[in-house]
Image (cartoon, helix red, strand yellow):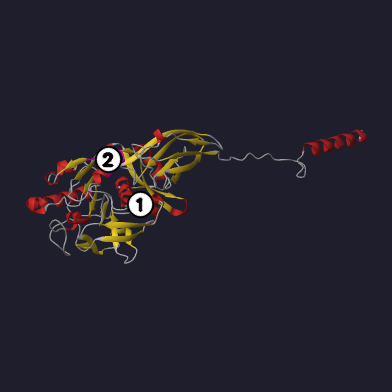
Amino acid sequence: MKKLNLLFIFILLMFAVSCGSDPDTNTEVVTENVLKTGKVAGRVMSQNGSKPIGGASVFTFDDKYKIYHTNSDADGNFILEAPEGNHTIYIQTGNGSNFRTEAAATIKNNETVNLELTQTKLTQVAKIAYVKGSYDKIENIIQNLGYTATEITNADLANINTLAEYDILFLNCGSRKYSQFSSVYPLIETNLAIFVANGGSVYASDWDVSYLVGGDDNTNNCSLPGGFIPDTKLCSKNIGSAGQVAGTVNNAALVSALGFNSLNIDYDLGAWQKIISYDPAYWEVLVKDATTNDALMLRTNQFTSTNVPTTPIGNAPNLLYTTVCVTLPNNIQITISVPQIVVPYLVALGATVGPCSGASGSGYIYYTTFHNHATGNIGNAAVILQYVILNL
């Protein structure tokens, strides 16, 4: 009996050893969840395919609304890395509210999908208006890109219902004609304030700075009566002389979009506007004189005004898109427009509603001391004006 008990104990010990874990010999299998990604490539073009568009935002989201983003280069080319699967690729300029398009793409692991040019042409969402000038034809540049603009008059500017039909307004140099419309200019300036404060964007060239700060057909002094921008923000006088000016592009994003950082601007008329002073906290200098550092091109979205009524502006707000600010890696912030349905998900990930900078609700104001002359473009400034059109 004693021998049988010892045998039984021995068998139990052997069984325990064979069923136990041995850290030296047991192998634990670990499955890593590796994100599978591919790439989508293409070339951003204007609506008629005539002009590659640099500086456009190209982005998509994964199924948890994490953003994947890149920009097109000066030749319009882009390569976007994103998770595999079916995605909507968003292509936009500016904050995306005026020019954008979308393309469907099936991204495959370690492969590159090439979008066709028909998928990457920027579509005009905005309604654009212009006032005819004497020395300037920005409408020609708009049309050469394949977009449409409607001519309106100073009488139309005096009617807020007419002005509010548009998202973007171009004021060509020489359009003010103060002596003919002096009685309605206080109303025009009030309407321009309403327009910009509610998200409309304005471009004014050369003498038409008088719409912004006051004066007659042009501004010949500081702090003139009229205008809708405070006199402390900007002073421009028509004392600039004719001749070539070497300009420097002063904005990194604009340099990337254009592919150059310097240009010669041909001021081919007498009495050009010269910026005397500006508030650097209010205006961003996009182009400056390389020799004197004088500002030649300004931009702001800082406009605010008290007692301005809330007024629906243009076509863009009716398309169920919302402007949001998204933070990318390295704390880079971008302003984009996205379908309203995805906004709560982006906000949950840290995005904020509205632009990343500027006054809430404000549209952009661009002002250039140069323009495209009615008899021909001045140097390669037309390329910069193409950028202005697409980024208002």
Residue 142 at what x, y percent from top left? 28, 42
Residue 46 seen anywhere in this rendered image of the structure: yes
Residue 233 seen anywhere in this rendered image of the structure: no
Residue behind mark 1:
356
Q: Nearer the viewer, mark 2 or mark 1?
A: 2
Q: Who is closer to the viewer here, 383 or 378?
A: 378
Q: Who is closer to the viewer here, 293 or 107?
A: 293
Residue 56 at what x, y percent from top left? 39, 45
- Type of residue at label 1? Cys
Quadrant including the N terminus? top right
Query: With 205 as the anchor, is 62 left or right in this view?
Result: right
Q: Residue at x 32, y 45 (%)?
A: 390
Give the secondary structure at mark 2.
helix
How many residues crowd around disc 2 within 10 Å: few (fewer than 14), some, or many (20 or more)? few
Q: Which mark is residue 143?
A: 2
Q: Is residue 366 above or below residue 238?
A: above
Give the secondary structure at mark 1.
loop
Q: Who is closer to the viewer here, 340 or 97?
A: 97
Residue 102 occupies quadrant: top left
Q: Magenta span has 264?
A: no
Q: Which mark is residue 193?
A: none
Determine the residue located farthest toward the bottom in the rendered image: 292
Q: How many marks?
A: 2
How many residues crowd around disc 1 within 10 Å: few (fewer than 14), some, or many (20 or more)? some
Q: Is residue 344 above or below residue 381?
A: above
- Magenta range is 141-149
Residue 356 at what x, y percent from top left? 35, 51
Q: Residue at x 13, y 47 (%)?
A: 154
Q: Who is closer to the viewer here, 221 or 378?
A: 378
Query: With 285 as the anchor, is 207 left or right in this view?
Result: left
Q: Earlier in the sequence, mark 2 or mark 1?
A: 2
